């Protein structure tokens, strides 16, 4: 048999139930890989991979309305470690920032006492990683330091603010959704509040003006219902308040979010449609509408890795819609680009099953995993959390697809690099490894031979369910003793209002059994052994006041239930209580208006039904004293005597008195059945309505009436009795407790002034005289030896929920069921406290490096990143020279063991190259900044290496020319914006302008489109738009002249110089945009970029450089931008590094990483550069290489990885010699293998 270890020490924990309506929006999935969810005033921390609750945070007094994990967008080191930080806000306006592992609060923030509308951490973390923006109703936004709780600034707005969204591409942009429209803030900064009131925008749908309705091309199919309606009513975004006849659409706008997949796009969610806006034009460019019979939306989450939307519908169904590629791979891209783009279309690609929605069960919110974007979690109002995973299935390509959807293809690369021949990969690692990039018109699709067509499906991979609705009846199983220690399980039985009994194992906090026992509300449970219990339930009374009583006996291992009282139970007075004797022999059932019944539990027989004139029982308790020991002693003596008697010789036998024999036989007969059916004598006491105490003895099937004690004058009607050892305690309806010392024959009354004493229970354990008392307004623990109160819990004072039931679960822990639907296991002090996560006993190990100590987490990361000491890779930390305490080593090994087998096999695969490994580990750790860095680095290292390999000389700082771009990994995704290759970026911008053109519906829009086309160099199209201006428009003359100018520009010297002069004058006089346009007309875009940068329009300059300049000029502009980003007042060094990576300035990146003390990233990056041959070890680079490697070696030494440190020090050349000596002091010479390695590299 497997040795069963018993965890006697139970952790304090909370079992949660249904959610409150205010908890609806309180759920978040962090980069750390965990889900936080508000449940009443507590916060659950859920691990989605193993679907278990690993922490419950309790400190809020009011309902939690928002939770947000902090971002991980910074470089992690010993000084800024991996830590679990969570901000939570409640309906009383309090914000708490938690250290989740220890369950303690970093700080508490309070500004007003109204519910927080929205909050989020700032995503740029170069300057500080502790900044938290919150909306305090009705109209304040406040920026807090989430570490110290200090207020940095506060700003008020004219309208009530409902929510906000940060621009994921530009930290200075913020959009507020207000009760009247949208407010765009473009000067958001952490140092000072926004200066202006922002740009107010109203959403309205005016009647389409006839001048701008374009005829729909006949080739297109007729639009369907919802689409037709939206074509009629072009949704406009206006800067002035809409007039009376324009219908304001804002009233039911549910949500506003920037799209993280492409810059300057935003979505607005309405119950029946999602609008995609292009913010440069303030115009709708796409609509996702629901058919008339469809189910309305509740929420939508846009993805970053692909242009896709996760939508949640009112029936709990999650759908995934992916933006359609603008060119189907089979059409020739040479056809007229006009025809290809009509609007952004999001095709439904996958959907999960709906849930059964009732009055009390409805879907609340969905969250998706920010690291991989292919897992979704749905919270339901009944406390369930459903975990859905998106899976990609390779499908056979259909010859003629009936659905009309273009096929989705899986990408060819894995973790940023082309796959090796037999390389293992994880298909469903993340959204961008499941489906490839959407194509843009004009770019060549990758060869179809390499591609696999995939289909997406949702799979339910986990489900957490909460407790049902209160009320509850609690009973803990019999206590742990020395006899049952080998098979003891701390089981708590919870009777519920729907008649089922839930049995929880309190070691793990998991549901052990869910038994459907009764048909009505369970009123009480009594255990009759460690594995069986009795429970009773009563139906609602009929007109005569009679009910149906159900008393069931349940055997846990088999789940067998039987009606304990047989057929009886229909139409009789309700059962008030049942009490099982201490030896679990007898059961007393007390009824409301009917004499009590006495049963034998072992045989299930009715011993006695009391006479009609039996007094009415108000409280009853069995005595702990019995004669089992003396009976067993007698039985033993009898056995011995019998044994002696049978061995005597015949003549001796006759001399033994026959009377003795008869006595022995009598004793033996009483205890027949091998000691199983010894009927020991037990007693119980009860009180009647006058407060008189009766004493009754039960032995076998005889029932004797004992002494009666007259009522105590100071007590009211007795409500409950508890008896342990020599102490008997009575509680009455007026809140008095009476302590009787039976040995000393003393009684002592204590008035608690807390009203009706509902229940009293003694704690288990020999000599433990603690007493738990339950009142209508809370509970208390008393010490009956000293007759003093130990701790108290009162509604309104230290908690905000009513207590429904109580019990002891161990000798020092109590369990309380409360009205908020939770069951709490608390210390005797009854302070509701969060627990330390590392002290928990989890059933399944959880992969979460954030749970380790900061040093251990970094060690684990270094261990996974590079193991250069042997040809093979290992997942066993004990095989490594690692100097650290055994406990920490054990914890790290537990983390390694908890990884999925797929992940282990990929990490152990020798084909996995360094770049892929860095990307994979940053995904595993949920390290946002690492992930971004390695994605861009991997892409450009490979494309520059390839250009070099094709022997195209590329000077540093220039992107390889377009011809060399036929790399298998294609181009960087468009969500990297200006970091993408120029040719791809240009195509994307052109397509975007075409889309804007199709969608424009006013002169303003047309003008903006013409301006964009001029900057993009599309002069012919721009002239057509300029000539569209109607004659009654005030700028008619101006536009016509401009059209003439554009068509007649020649590159003759004088005209060029004139235009340049005019442009510079315009710029000097504040007409920057117009001046830049003129410069672009005469191909002086480089000057235009310089002017834009001088006037602080850095993003615009970068955009222009990307679409207009040749590589050399563009590189200069972008380098200046990178310098600007590094300046102390901007402080966006991480962005600057990405810009330099895209230019191929790898040496400069290495130096910057080194100067910023990102030692691990610097060393690994330089190693990758050397591997790919884009950096060579020569005199100019050796200094950098040596410094980077030796610093990384030092870092590894402080982490305790000595072999690793020696390896890097030996690679560092002269710089590392001293460190090598220090490492190998006392170990003789440098080992030969490191020397050998140096040569092989």
Image (cartoon, rainbow, N blue to C red):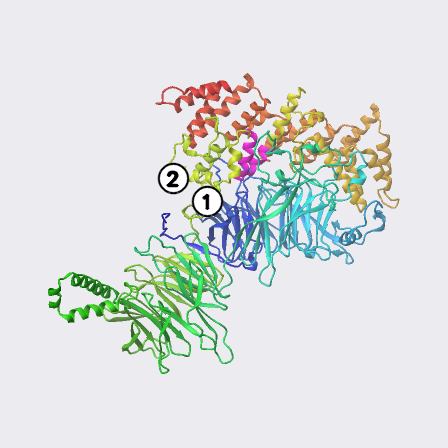
**Which segment did they paint magenta?**
913-935
Q: Is residue 1132 visible?
A: no
* 948 lies above or below 927: above
N-terminal label among 2 and 1: 1
The alpha-carbon separation of the residues under discs 2 and 1 comes to 16 Å
Residue 1137, percent from left and from top: 59, 31
Residue 597 lies in quadrant: bottom left
Depth check: give the residue in front, 321 or 646.
646
Mark 2 or 1, closer to the camera: 1
- Say which residue appears at 61% left-offset and 27% top-offset: 941
Q: Is residue 56 visible?
A: yes
- Say which residue appears at 33% left-offset and 74% top-offset: 686
Q: Residues within 10 Å of mark 2 (few under 14, many from 20)?
A: few
Dot 1: element: loop
Depth check: give the residue in front, 568 or 786.
568
Residue 249, percent from left and from top: 72, 55
Tally of numbered discs = 2
Residue 1021, percent from left and from top: 82, 36
Dot 2: element: helix
**Most distant residue in the top direction:** 1179
**Most distant residue in the front direction:** 650
Q: Is residue 933 magenta?
A: yes
* 1118 lies above or below 486: above
Q: Is residue 475 magenta?
A: no
Residue 1227 lies in quadrant: top left
Q: Main secondary structure of the magenta part?
A: helix
- Say which residue appears at 81% left-offset and 40% top-offset: 339
Per the rendering, the mark at residue 887 is 2
Residue 865, percent from left and from top: 50, 32
Q: Which residue is mark 1?
A: 845
**Most distant residue in the right direction:** 1031
């Amino acid at each position: 048999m497997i040795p069963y270890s018993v965890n006697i020490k139970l952790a304090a924990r909370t079992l949660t139930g249904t959610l409150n309506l205010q908890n609806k929006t309180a759920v978040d999935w962090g980069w750390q890989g965990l889900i936080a969810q508000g449940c009443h005033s507590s916060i659950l921390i859920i691990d989605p991979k193993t679907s278990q609750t690993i922490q419950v945070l309790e400190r809020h007094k009011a309902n939690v309305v928002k939770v947000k994990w902090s971002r991980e967008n910074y470089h992690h080191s010993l000084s800024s470690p991996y830590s679990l930080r969570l901000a939570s806000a409640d309906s009383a306006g309090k914000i708490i920032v938690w250290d989740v592992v220890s369950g303690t609060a970093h700080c508490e923030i309070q500004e007003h006492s109204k519910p927080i509308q929205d909050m989020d951490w700032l995503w740029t973390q170069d300057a500080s990683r502790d900044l938290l923006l919150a909306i305090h109703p009705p109209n304040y936004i406040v920026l807090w330091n989430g570490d110290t709780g200090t207020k940095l600034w506060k700003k008020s707005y004219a309208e009530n603010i409902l929510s906000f969204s940060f621009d994921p591409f530009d930290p200075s942009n913020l959009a507020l959704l207000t009760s009247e429209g949208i407010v765009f803030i473009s000067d958001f900064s952490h140092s000072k509040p926004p200066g202006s009131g922002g740009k107010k925008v109203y959403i309205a749908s005016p009647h389409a003006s006839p001048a701008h309705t374009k005829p729909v091309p006949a080739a297109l199919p007729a639009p369907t219902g919802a689409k037709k309606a939206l074509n009629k009513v072009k949704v406009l975004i206006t800067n002035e308040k809409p007039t009376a006849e324009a219908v304001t659409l804002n009233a039911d706008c549910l949500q506003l979010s920037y799209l993280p997949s492409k810059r300057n796009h935003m979505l607005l969610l309405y119950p029946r449609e999602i609008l995609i806006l292009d913010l440069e034009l303030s115009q709708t460019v796409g609509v996702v509408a629901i058919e008339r019979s469809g189910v309305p939306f509740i929420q939508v989450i846009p993805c970053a890795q692909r242009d896709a939307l996760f939508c949640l519908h009112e029936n709990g169904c999650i759908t995934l819609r992916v933006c359609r590629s603008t060119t189907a791979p089979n059409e020739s891209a040479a056809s007229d680009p006009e025809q290809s783009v009509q609007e952004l279309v999001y095709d439904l690609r996958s959907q999960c099953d709906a849930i059964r929605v009732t009055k009390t069960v409805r879907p609340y919110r969905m969250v998706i995993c920010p690291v991989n974007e292919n897992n979704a979690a749905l919270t339901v109002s009944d406390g369930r959390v459903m975990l859905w995973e998106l899976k990609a299935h390779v499908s056979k390509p259909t010859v003629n697809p009936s659905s009309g959807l273009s096929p989705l293809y899986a990408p060819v690369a894995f973790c940023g690099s082309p796959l090796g021949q037999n390389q293992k990969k994880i298909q469903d690692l993340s959204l961008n490894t499941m489906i490839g990039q959407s194509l843009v018109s004009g770019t060549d699709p990758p060869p179809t031979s390499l591609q696999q067509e995939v289909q997406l499906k949702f799979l339910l991979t986990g489900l957490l369910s909460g407790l049902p609705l209160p009320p509850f009846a609690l009973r803990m199983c019999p206590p742990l003793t020395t006899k049952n220690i080998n098979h003891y399980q701390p089981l708590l039985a919870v009777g519920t209002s729907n008649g089922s009994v839930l049995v929880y194992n309190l070691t793990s906090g998991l549901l052990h059994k869910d038994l459907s026992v009764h048909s009505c509300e369970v009123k009480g449970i009594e255990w009759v052994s460690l594995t069986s219990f009795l429970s009773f339930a009563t139906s609602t009374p009929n007109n005569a006041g009679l009910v149906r009583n159900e008393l069931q006996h349940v055997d846990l291992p088999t789940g067998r239930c039987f009606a304990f009282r047989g057929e009886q139970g229909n139409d009789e007075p309700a059962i008030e209580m049942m009490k099982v004797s201490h030896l679990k022999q007898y059961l007393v059932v007390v009824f409301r208006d009917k004499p009590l019944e006495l049963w034998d539990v072992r045989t299930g027989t009715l011993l006695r039904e009391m006479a009609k004139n039996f007094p009415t029982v108000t409280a009853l308790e069995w005595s702990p004293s019995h004669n089992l020991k003396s009976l067993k002693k007698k039985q033993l003596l009898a056995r011995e005597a019998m044994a002696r008697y049978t061995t005597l010789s015949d003549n001796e036998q006759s001399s033994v008195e026959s009377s003795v024999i008869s006595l022995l036989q009598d004793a033996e007969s009483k205890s027949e059945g091998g000691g199983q059916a010894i009927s020991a004598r037990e007693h119980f006491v009860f009180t009647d309505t006058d407060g008189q105490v009766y004493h009754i003895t039960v032995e076998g099937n005889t029932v004797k009436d004992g002494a009666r004690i007259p009522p105590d004058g100071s007590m009211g009607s007795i409500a409950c009795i508890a008896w342990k050892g020599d102490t008997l305690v009575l509680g009455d309806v007026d809140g008095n407790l009476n302590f009787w010392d039976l040995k000393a024959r003393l009684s002592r009354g204590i008035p608690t002034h807390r009203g009706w004493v509902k229940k009293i229970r003694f704690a288990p354990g020999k000599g433990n005289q603690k007493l738990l008392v339950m009142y209508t307004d809370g509970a208390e623990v008393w010490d009956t030896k000293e007759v003093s109160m130990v701790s108290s819990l009162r509604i309104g004072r230290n908690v905000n929920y009513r207590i429904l039931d109580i019990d002891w679960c161990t000798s020092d822990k109590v369990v309380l069921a409360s009205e908020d639907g939770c069951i709490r296991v608390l210390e005797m002090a009854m302070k509701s406290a969060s627990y330390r996560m590392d002290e928990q006993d989890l059933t399944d190990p959880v992969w979460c490096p954030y749970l380790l100590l900061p040093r251990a987490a970094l060690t684990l990361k270094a261990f996974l990143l590079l193991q250069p000491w042997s040809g093979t890779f290992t997942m066993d930390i004990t095989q490594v020279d690692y100097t650290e305490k055994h406990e920490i080593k054990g914890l790290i090994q537990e983390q390694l063991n908890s990884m999925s087998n797929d992940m282990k096999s990929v990490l152990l695969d020798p084909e996995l190259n360094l770049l892929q490994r860095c990307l994979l580990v940053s995904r595993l750790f949920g390290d946002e900044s690492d992930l971004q860095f390695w994605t861009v680095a991997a892409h450009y290292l490979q494309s520059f290496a390839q250009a070099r390999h094709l022997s195209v000389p590329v000077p540093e700082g220039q992107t390889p020319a377009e011809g060399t771009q036929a790399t298998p990994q294609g181009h960087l995704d468009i969500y990297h914006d200006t970091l993408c290759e120029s040719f791809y970026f240009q195509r994307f911008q052109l397509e975007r302008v075409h889309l804007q053109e199709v969608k424009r519906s006013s002169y303003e829009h047309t003008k903006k489109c013409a301006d964009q086309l001029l900057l993009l160099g599309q002069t012919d199209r721009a002239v057509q738009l300029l000539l569209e201006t109607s004659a009654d428009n005030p700028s008619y003359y101006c536009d016509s002249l401009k059209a003439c100018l554009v068509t007649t520009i020649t590159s003759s010297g004088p005209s060029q110089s004139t235009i340049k002069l005019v442009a510079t004058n315009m710029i000097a006089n504040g007409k920057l945009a117009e001046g830049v346009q003129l410069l672009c007309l005469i191909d002086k875009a480089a000057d235009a970029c310089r002017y834009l940068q001088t006037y602080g329009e850095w993003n615009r300059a970068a955009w222009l450089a990307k679409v207009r300049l040749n590589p050399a000029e563009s590189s200069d502009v972008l380098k200046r931008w990178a310098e600007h980003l590094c300046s102390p007042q901007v402080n966006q060094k991480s962005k600057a590094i990405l810009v330099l990576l895209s230019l191929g300035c790898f040496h400069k990146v290495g130096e910057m990483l080194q100067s910023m003390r990102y030692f691990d990233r610097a060393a690994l990056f330089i190693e990758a550069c050397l591997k790919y041959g884009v950096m060579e070890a020569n005199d100019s680079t050796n200094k950098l290489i040596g410094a980077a490697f030796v610093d990384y070696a030092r870092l590894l030494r402080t982490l305790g990885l000595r072999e690793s440190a020696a390896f890097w020090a030996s690679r560092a050349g002269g710089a590392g010699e001293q460190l090598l000596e220090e490492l190998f002091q006392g170990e003789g010479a440098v080992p030969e293998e490191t020397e050998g390695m140096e040569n092989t590299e």
